[in-house]
Amino acid sequence: MELRKNYFADVRKDDLHEIGQPRPRSDSPGHVTGKTAYFADRSFPGMLHLKMVRSPHHHARIRSIDTSEAEKHPGVVRVLTAKDVPHNVYTILILIQIGPEDETVLADGKVRWKGEAVVAVLAETERAAQEAAAKVRIDYEVLPAVFDMEEALKPGAPLVNEYHGQNYYLYDSGECRKVRFGDVEAGFAGADHILEQSYQSSPIEHAPTETTGCVVAPEGNDRFTCYTNTQAMFFTLDNTSIILQMPGSKLHFVGGTVGGGFGGKVDVIVEPIAILGAKLTGRPVCFIYSREEEMQISSPRAAEKVVIKDGVMTDGRIVARKVTGYTDAGAYSRHSPYGAQKGAGHYPGPYTIPNVWIDTYCVYTNRTPSSAMRGFGVTIGDFALEVQMDKLARLIGMDPLEFRFINAYRDGDMKAHRQPTEGAALIECMQEASRVANWPVAEKYMAMSSYAKGA
Amino acid sequence: MAKVPVQFTLNGSEKAEFIDSGTTLLNALRDKIGDTSPKGGCHQGTCGACSVIIDGELRLSCLTLAETCDGAAITTTLGLAEGGVMHPLQRAFLDTFATQCGFCTPGMIMAAKVLLDHTPNPSRDEVIEALSGNICRCTGYEPIIQAVLRAARANSQNAA
Amino acid sequence: MAIRRGRGVAAINYPTGMNLGGDPTQALVHSTPTGNFMVTLSSVDLGQGMKQIMAQICAETIGVPTDRVVVDTADTDTGPHCMGTFASRGTHRAGNAVIQAAREARQVMLEVAAEELEVNASDLETDGQGNILVKGAPQKSISIFDVALSAHFKRGRSISGRGMFLIPRSYPEKETGAMKPSTCYAHACTVAEVEVDDETGEVTVLTVKNVFEIGRALNPKMVEQQLVGGSWMGISHALYETTEPYYPNRDHGGTDFNQYLMPGPGDLAETKIIVLERPSADGPYGAKGPGEMCANPQIPAVANAVFDAVGVRIDTLPITPERILRALKAQAAN
């Protein structure tokens, strides 16, 4: 890595002692000696293992659940179903008033995705828990499922989630989050060229080397200590408190040393049920995802569809941009309504465009609920935007890098969501990229600055 | 369930345990003996985080039954430092900032140690080959490759 | 049939934090009797190095070496609230809270030193090595060790501080979408070079040259870790990763590391990382969040390079050999 101190030297003081120094990481000696304690490195005498019985169907009504054979299995201590969970229907972002509560800790009457948790088995050993889980008998009535976002949005599509009542998240702005800036239709009407293109991704897994999990120990004082690899301590504690209807003062969460997160450990999934298990048995409990659960059960990055329509002039100016984004939330909200909204705030990208129209939808389908991942709400949008930029440049016969200089945002430019640009540095990044990649652009672009025009 | 006796040396000390037949070496080390330096990233032999050295060979402890290790000499990352002084590989991982979350690190160091024990001056390709059974999701691998090459250089300088 | 070369570029920005949800983090700082400093947080270190960076920020603000700071984090019995580690917010939000707490602690420290030295606190400065000096008269000084002892056992002062950083929640306006999603943005531009085998559809990324603007590289070696790893993940996303290869078909999802593909150590592109620093107005020492955006520009840069190489657009991720071959076939048919 090379630091290029010549850029922005006029707005930066390099007079610091500790900041900017490549000090050794204080946690590395623990990592290289094998002494760093991750949550799963703690175990307690008498610890029980929790295994989930999961739905084999994408969408089904649960007619009945028979746990009697599982309960008789040697080593089984307790079997939990929906009726054991005090506040079974929850949603993570209720803490910041993004409802409705739409997800069950353990499925109650219905499953909405293949892999949804239905019954939790607590046993003396992992093997006993697994064997007993296989003995739980669930009678399902399979229902039609919908996997395609466009199909899900059509009238008459199977309803994925009754708590929403329709297959999209209802924002205060309606069926999508909207951004309206300028007059996009007038922009298209005056453009030399119009290009409308569609981009698509599929779910992506965080794949941390340490799977999601927790270890819970009941303390002697009616409190529960939960060792967890959550990315958000109080998010998890407060949601657990709601789900278990247990005062937060009874809960003690210890974490902060995580074997990779990338956004995959911000959901509150394993902790509430493990603490409930510890409460109902009085025993320590561990609930750790298998690699298969991490890959197919834990929330992935959402699949997205992005449709971009641009009006561009032959001189390189983009004069209008319309973006319609669809985020595939899967069966439940988790963080997806937020991610779709974050996308609305991100488009039309780091470019100054006078006429912008953005609609972002959060769509429910019968698949593994998606959630946050590194670049949440933005990564796939950037793929779409930047491929579109390349296509536009070629459409008008312009160098793709020069085309970006023409449209790059600079300090003071008004963004589509009506915030003036501050602290821009896109132009300088492109100038340096031009140099290091030996991708020459015209001198006038190398002379540009992100600072406000005329400043 | 009938317990099976198993005896081996772990980082030079003798260990004797009664285990359930079918217990993996990973679980025996972590749950019975308390050496948690091998990590369980997949329990199916695909991530390398559980790697240990058995009689000089790199092995996946999650796919090794503990009862097959009777009489073996087992080394884990926890046993590499001697007298509080880190092994050159550990030092090199520190110096090259080759750890981020650290979860894959003990397995990486085991794989690297077996490489350097057999091939003190490996090529870059040999290092890559040696690490190819270990998954790292944070670093992009390059700093880990650099760490192993650095440790090899340090070894050869000490030997010279 | 041939191996064809191409290159592509992409430029991006990325918001720091989650203003659309309200975004608070708190920190507490206190000194021990011998002048070491404890930072107490509930922020989570995912491997990015939160603990180390908060120690450096506290040390810089108090005016002591980093190794005199210990970070105690992610215990809800002791650490004050943090929203969490996501949305590129950790360093920015927690860093600001630590600065505020450390400033308050520093002020008490200087007041105690002023009493010991019989000068005004405003006339004192730290040397960054553990001493407090009178400005312009550095021979008149006291060690922080002695100041802390005095505070604890003689003056009855608590050298401590509280920090709270909150960016108020922005509610998007219903009709126009007017909102403030972030207070600062990181930037990047990536140029990727690829080889595409037009017989097998296989893509090899030869080089990625990444320029990142991140506000301030608080610890350059740790920034490098994030950026190198992120660049690798971006390439991995572009070419390999999916849990549903035939989305929206739900079948064929990989369940382990054999089926879920990522580049291994033998598949690395030659990677160049350049860092620019335009300090952000509200970042801790100007820092922005680099951890997420560093994995974004490689994806479109690789996609554009594939087009440059073989003249087909793959607008569906990941850019698999199958998709390239189907597109080449369709192109040939036209």
Image: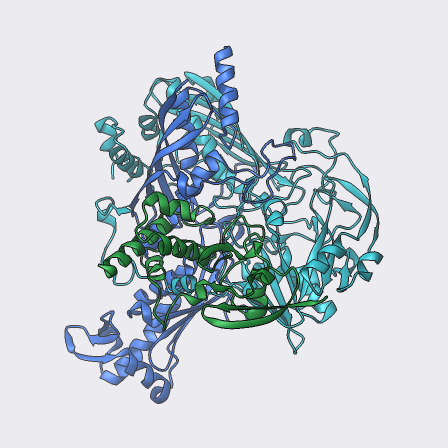
Chain colours: A cyan, B green, C blue
Q: Quadrant of residue C8?
A: top left
Q: Is residue B23 left or right of residue A427?
A: right
Outermost residue on the front side: it is B71
Of A425 and C190, the residue lying toward us: C190
Q: Is residue A322 above or below residue B115?
A: above
Q: Please say if A175 is above or below A71.
A: above
Q: Can residue C228 be seen?
A: no
Q: Residue furthest top?
A: C334
Q: How many marks?
A: 0
Q: Residue C54: x percent and y percent? A: 38, 63
Image quadrant where residue A57 sits? top right
Residue sitting at x 35%, y 76%: C36
Using the image as rendered, state which of residue B66 and residue A410 is in the foreground. B66
Q: Is residue A360 left or right of residue C115?
A: right
What is the quadrant of the N terminus of chain C in the image?
A: top left
Residue C184, x across and y down, in percent? 39, 47
For this orientation, the residue located farthest to the bottom is: C154
Residue B129: tell me if it is visible: yes
Who's the residue at 51% across and 16% down the image? Answer: C329
Residue A219 position within the rendered picture, expressed as x and y whole percent measured from the top left? 64, 75
Between A384 and B103, the residue placed more toward the observer is B103
Residue C131 left/right relative to A26: left
Q: Position of residue A294 (x, y in %)?
A: 59, 49
